[in-house]
Image (spheres, helix red, strand yellow):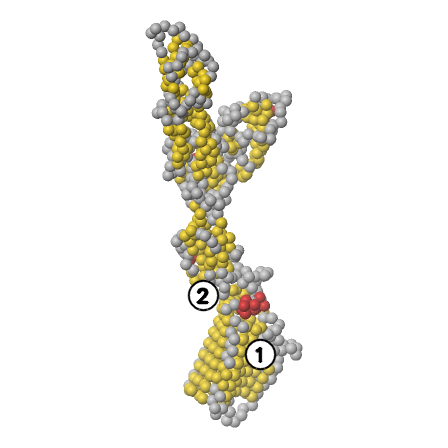
């Protein structure tokens, strides 16, 4: 019961630097429940406290057992301990309470907070285990090494390790702290046999009976009360009788057995089991369990003791036991013990890549506690679709990593295809007590090939990932030319540099939404010994307003270009050519080409190349215009709409070429028409493989 206690001391000694660790609860922090005051007063201290910041000795309460501090908001707790009228300690603890139970009335979380946590103090019994909901995490003590998923917590039913255990639980947003009180669950023998002697520290025998004489092991009778030393490796028989010796006087005796051996063994359930080897008349009593927050309770005399703790907790200390023989005190024995139910920390992944996306192979190193062995499993690489993906993808959640093997070095994750690949790596640790940690997880998409370009992005120094795209073509040139293959997802308007852009490695461009490449008047796309593919993309060459102009648009040198559903728009102030091909391959499907110049325009000019167009639209506009100028190589034109707008113009001029021209429509809007001129001019060396179903007008 709390009692307001006002006391004035005239003089106190300053408290020692070797202060007694006595505050079990509360501690500093912010909590979602009211806190209990629990102090360790095993040194028989008298403690006073206040929770308003006032001096406990003048306006405080006397501590007489665990008590709920029924206060919310900021709390300043002050504690003063006094031993033999001397102040020993002054302690101040500041914490904050924002009491909350945000759960539905019928939920397990609500019942747990209401029944176990809210009062800040819970008395555990084996009949009612602590059921922490799985939606919570928990840890014991005040040093958070790691937390654990909520579960049902119980102790061995014979546990005699009495303690106050701080328990911390969290739902991810709120933190609750409460104290679990564990008492011994059994009662032993309390009877004590009355004898006229005492034994101190096993070997010292002192006879203290009045008007009695005694002998040991049938030796001479004596009335001496001086201590003697016994050899406790053998048994001794003590006899005594009245000092008024007379025949027939009753003689009483007591057999002191050899000193027992204290034993400690650990069960498969990791409980510490204390017992002894020796005479069956011995019994033990716990004098001290040695743990912080430990409680020494006289629950009687036993032949053995079981110490246990909850999953997630670890206890290591030295226990002191008093031994009695037929209720007669014999001495004490100590034993160090360790109950380790605290799993090691989950392994930590150390990667050469800090992000979810990696642009090259990933090297992983795993670290855990020094005495722990690590096991890991790597999923099979999952090819990731070229569609946009995110770290929380459901497809990723279903990926399994389950074949665990011992870890003994680096883990290498490689990308071995032109697709991005997803890996999931899981790991857990097992310590020397065979405690298994939570499983940690590492996920990564290794994508050496796919990048994002967004002309509307304001991200500075983008890395080409989906969330940090590039915003200019200048950022991707080195990536293209330094790799084997690169794939770009394009959005928005992208400006090319003010000079010719040389591409020397394979690349592909796919449109996310309304993408357009703008090629300055003095620039061109030059492809050398590489392939270039694009779909749904607009390429626009702007007209120069000065004398500085590059007359080329696309230049292919031993290269391959594949365009599907694209638009090529080239505006030139003088002469202009859409595609200039040398020893190259050009494949166009459903693509439009419009080249407009003041003097001469050409859609495609090629030498010794393979030119293939299907379902395309080609327009050339200038004083002199031609859609196709092909020398040597092959030329295939299928189902295309071809048009020239010019003073003089033709659809195609073919020299030394193998040609297939089928189902096309040729239109000429010509200021001058030459009698007998045909839309297709072909020399005598060229070979027309197929030429039918073509229509023409305006020639």
**Marker disc for residue 43:** none
- Residue 552: image tag: 1
Residue 523 in the figure: left or right of residue 171: right
Which is nearer the N-term, disc 1 or disc 2? 2
Which residue is found at the position 45% from the left and 82% from the top? 636
Q: Are marks 1 and 2 in contact (CB under 8 Å)?
A: no
To which quarter of the image does residue 472 belong? bottom right
Q: Secondary structure at mark 2?
A: loop
In the depicted structure, whether residue 654 falls above or below residue 557: below
- Residue 34, horizontal then vertical, whole percent: 51, 35
Q: Residue furthest front?
A: 219
Residue receiving disc 2: 417
Q: Give how far across and how far down residue 330 sits, in percent.
A: 42, 22
Q: Is residue 43 above or below residue 241?
A: below
Where residue 477 appears, x then y in whole percent? 56, 69
Picture layout, residue 421 above or below residue 327: below
Q: Which residue ends up furthest to the bottom in the rendered image?
A: 675
Q: Residue at x 49, y 86 (%)?
A: 632
- Quick one: SS at disc 1? strand
| Other-residue count near label 1 (Cα within 10 Å), few / some / many at <14 / 14–19 / ≥20 | many
> Would you say residue 275 is visible in this rendering?
yes
């Amino acid at each position: 019961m709390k009692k307001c206690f006002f006391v004035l001391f005239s003089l106190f000694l300053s408290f020692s630097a070797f202060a007694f660790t006595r505050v079990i609860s509360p501690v500093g922090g912010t909590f979602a429940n009211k806190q209990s005051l629990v102090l360790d007063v095993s040194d028989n201290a008298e403690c006073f406290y206040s929770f308003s910041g006032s001096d406990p000795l003048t306006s405080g309460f006397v501590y007489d057992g665990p008590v709920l501090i029924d206060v919310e908001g900021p709390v300043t707790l002050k504690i003063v301990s006094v031993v033999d009228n001397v102040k020993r300690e002054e302690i101040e603890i500041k914490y904050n309470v924002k009491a909350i139970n945000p759960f539905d009335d019928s939920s397990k979380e609500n019942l747990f907070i209401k029944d176990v946590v809210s009062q800040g103090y819970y008395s555990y019994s084996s009949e009612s285990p602590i059921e922490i909901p799985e939606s919570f995490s928990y840890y014991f003590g005040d040093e958070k090494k790691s937390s654990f998923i909520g579960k049902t917590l119980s102790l061995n039913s014979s546990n005699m390790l009495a303690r106050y255990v701080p328990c911390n639980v969290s739902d991810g947003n709120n933190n609750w702290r409460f104290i679990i009180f564990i008492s011994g669950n059994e009662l032993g023998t309390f009877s004590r046999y009355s004898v006229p002697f005492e034994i101190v520290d096993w070997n010292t025998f002192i006879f203290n009976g009045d008007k009695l004489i005694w002998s040991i092991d049938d030796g001479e009778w004596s009335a001496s009360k001086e201590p003697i030393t016994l050899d406790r490796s053998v048994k001794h028989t003590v006899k005594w009788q009245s000092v008024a010796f007379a025949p027939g006087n009753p003689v009483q005796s007591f057999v002191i057995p050899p000193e027992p051996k204290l034993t400690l063994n650990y069960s498969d359930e990791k409980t510490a089991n204390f017992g002894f080897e020796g005479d069956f008349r011995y019994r033990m009593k716990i004098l001290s369990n040695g743990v912080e927050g430990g409680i020494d309770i006289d629950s009687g005399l036993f032949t053995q003791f079981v110490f246990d703790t909850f999953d997630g907790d670890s206890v290591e200390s030295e226990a002191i036991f008093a031994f009695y023989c037929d209720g007669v005190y014999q001495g004490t024995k100590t034993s160090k013990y360790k109950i380790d139910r605290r799993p090691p920390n989950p392994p930590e992944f150390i990667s050469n890549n800090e992000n979810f996306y990696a642009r090259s192979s990933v090297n992983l190193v795993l670290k855990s506690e020094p005495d722990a062995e690590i096991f890991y499993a790597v999923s099979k690489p999952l090819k990731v679709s070229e569609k946009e993906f995110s770290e929380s993808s459901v497809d990723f959640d279903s990926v399994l990593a389950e074949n665990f093997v011992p870890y003994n070095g680096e883990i290498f994750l490689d990308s071995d295809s032109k697709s991005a690949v997803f890996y999931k790596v899981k790991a857990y640790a097992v310590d020397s007590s065979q405690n298994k940690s939570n499983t940690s997880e590492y996920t990564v998409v290794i994508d050496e090939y796919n990048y994002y370009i967004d002309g509307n992005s304001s991200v500075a120094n983008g890395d080409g990932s989906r969330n940090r795209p590039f915003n200019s073509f200048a950022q991707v040139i080195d990536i293209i030319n330094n790799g084997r293959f690169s794939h770009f997802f394009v959005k928005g308007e992208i400006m090319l540099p003010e000079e010719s852009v040389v591409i020397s490695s394979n690349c592909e461009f796919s449109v996310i939404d309304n993408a357009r490449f703008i090629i300055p008047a003095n620039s061109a796309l030059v492809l050398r010994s590489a392939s270039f593919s694009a779909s749904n993309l607009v390429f626009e060459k702007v007209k120069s307003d000065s004398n500085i102009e590059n007359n080329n648009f696309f230049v292919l040198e031993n290269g391959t270009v594949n365009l599907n559903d694209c638009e090529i728009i080239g505006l030139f102030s003088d002469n202009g050519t859409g595609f200039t091909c040398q020893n190259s391959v050009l494949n166009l499907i459903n693509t439009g080409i419009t080249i407009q110049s003041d003097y001469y325009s050409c859609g495609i000019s090629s030498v010794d190349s393979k030119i293939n167009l299907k379902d395309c639209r080609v327009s050339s506009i200038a004083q002199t215009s031609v859609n196709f100028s092909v020398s040597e190589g092959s030329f295939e034109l299928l189902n295309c709409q071809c048009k020239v707008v010019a003073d003089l113009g033709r659809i195609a001029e073919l020299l030394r070429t193998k040609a297939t021209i089928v189902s096309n429509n040729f239109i000429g809007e010509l200021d001058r028409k030459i009698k007998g001129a045909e839309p297709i001019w072909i020399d005598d060396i060229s070979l027309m493989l197929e030429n039918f179903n073509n229509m023409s007008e305006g020639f």
